[in-house]
Image (tube, coloured by chain):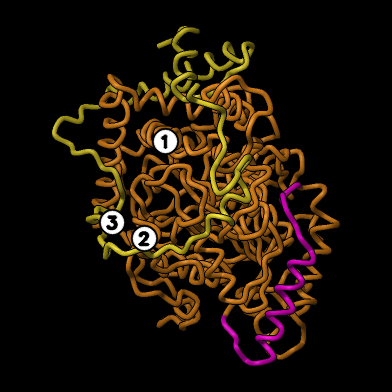
Chain colours: A orange, B yellow
Amino acid sequence: MTSPPLQPPFPRMSTAPLFDTPVSALRRALDTKEVSSVELATLFLDRIETLDPALNAFITVDRERTLAEARAADERIAQNHIGPLTGIPLAHKDVFCTEGMLTTCASRMLSNFVSPYDAHVVALLKKAGAVSLGKTNMDEFAMGSSSETSHYGPVRNPWETGHVPGGSSGGSAAAVAARLAPIATGTDTGGSVRQPASFCGVTGIKPTYGLVSRYGLIAYASSLDQGGAFGASAEDCALLLAAMTGFDARDSTSLERAPEDYAAALAAPPADAGKPLAGLVIGLPREFFGDGMSVDIRTAVDAALAQYRALGASTRDIDLPNAKLAIPAYYVIAMAEASSNLSRFDGVRYGHRAADYTDLADMYRKSRGEGFGAEVQRRILVGAYVLSHGYYDAYYLQAQKLRRLIAGDFRRAFGGCDLIAGPTSPVTAWALGAMSGDPVQMYLADIYTTPVNLAGLPGLSHPCGFDGGGLPIGLQLIGDYFSETKLLAAAHRFQQATDWHLRRPALAA
Amino acid sequence: MSLTTKQIEQLAQLARLALPGDAVNTMRSHLDSIFSLIAQMQAVDTTGIAPMSHPQELAARLREDVVTETDRRAAFQVVAPQAEAGLYLVPKVIE
């Protein structure tokens, strides 16, 4: 499928419906009192009520609570206490703790957990005056690539509801794709922001590990977990990500860095308007363009790269020789850390406790056996195995050594290019249930996203076309450490010249 | 490699997971498939490569040894399955 012959630039038009308006335009409408935050929140709450039964993108929506936040935002706007996101509605992945609100991580284990505190990300966005529409559905404990393992049932792809939205942040991606929320938070441990963004035709960014605090983000694999942002465009992602980043002493891996105004960097006019990406060198890893990628994806990615060249960028082939080892290394590290992190769920301090048990050990076993779904149990068991005496060196340490090799590949590659590009996923959204028989089938589809997490680099996915069945295709851009501005700016220039990101699923009309 | 039923049960015991009896066979086939995937790692010679535990290799941050948390015991115990008089209740462990 090719793009219709439109002439750039393509700003979302003022005739576009309010639910499909860039955050920057919502900001102006709020500031000029054309619309109130209560009206905006009501608009999106009504859309959730009408459209979400077909998608299952949300686990918890609390209309009264949302409207109270919107009224408070309207007061702040009236008093001119305005930040970039004051009064802007958003959705939170249900992996982030929200004080006084159900926080389930899509697990039966936490189906009764009302968090006593806010995650750092949630607190920052609250402070910025953003209005939370609710908590989005996901793979249980963020373990999955399809959002099918949720205790609350699978999320459906807004482009084709018989297909998955990707995962694990599938609810957030589907919500933004269907315009049930203008922006949404997510987390990315092995691709959980970029891959669902790709499957749902939206933009998603995972920043450099350490930029977003993990405090209050229910841990899966701590050395890989990182908060990220979804939006309809790179510009919207820039606004959300800027509000999510910042040092937090409560996260031992939080980085002390001055905040960056990504949106301002995007708004700066390029030196050469005709060639806004002049001088940018994009590396194309041979390993990301080999077998296993569908023809439709190959065609769409090649066309996107031609567009980047038309904008002034140059492309060159590079090598990431160890990238193929990312899948086994990633799954060993993630499962090991998961088995350790999830040992906290013991039926004593919070979460599910079995009704019948004989003694303390039996209570642990039954509470965890009932509370965790099959995929979570698999990962805990493999994690326990690879960490056990006699296997630790062969598996966990070996995986950490491969991790260093993979990070080294990227370091060498960035000596000769500014960004790296390729497909986000070798496949488009598969049919619900199609990959459920063999978990490894699904793991293998994470081939292009997991190396980025192992190295701790920032990555972004933006829409670049559709397959023959009308399902979105994503282009992944990978940057060197702390190159979020460069990543977002490149995607922004691409989006100023194309209209893939403006397409909306029929369901979201 | 293939795990025996006994090995899976032992692993489940270590992980404090009660697996329903009929789940063990499905679990074994899935675990076998995962172990053959991760076995690929063994073919790589990593002699002399140091393990990398975190992407940003920074020294652990130190802070003053002072109390920074406030007492929120009551708020935290509201979500406990069973708590009484400020204590978490568990089945009796000492006769």
Chain for mark 3? A
- Between disc 2 and disc 1, whose residue precedes? 2
- Residue plotted at (61% across, 76% down): A129
Q: Give the class, few, some or many, for how many residues have Cα within 10 Å of label 3's Cα (few <14, many ≥20).
A: some
Q: Nearer the viewer, mark 1 or mark 3?
A: 1
Label 2 secondary element: loop
Q: Amino acid at mark 2?
A: Ser
- Between disc 2 and disc 3, whose residue precedes? 2
Q: Are marks 1 and 3 on the same chain?
A: yes
Q: Amino acid at mark 3?
A: Phe
Q: In front here: A170 or A82?
A: A82
How many marks the image carries: the answer is 3
Q: Amino acid at mark 1?
A: Ser
Q: Are marks 2 and 1 on the same chain?
A: yes
Chain for mark 2? A
Q: Extreme left residue here?
A: B48
Residue B93 screen position, x and y as percent = 50, 25
Would you place residue A118 above or below residue A195 in this image?
A: below
Please indicate whether residue B84 sits to the left or right of residue A407 in the image. right
What mark, if any, has residue A414 been given in the picture? 3
- The quadrant holding residue B45 is top left
Q: Give the class, few, some or many, for how many residues have Cα within 10 Å of label 2's Cα (few <14, many ≥20).
A: many
What mark, if any, has residue A340 been given in the picture? 1
Report if the CB atoms under discs 1 and 3 are less than 8 Å apart: no
Quick check: can you spot residue A336? yes
Q: Is residue A74 magenta?
A: yes
Q: Which residue is mark 2?
A: A254
Report if the CB atoms under discs 2 and 1 are less than 8 Å apart: no
Q: Which residues fall within the magenta stretch?
A: A56-83
What mark, if any, has residue A159 been given in the picture? none
Measure how far apart labels 2 and 3 are at the Cα level: 24 Å
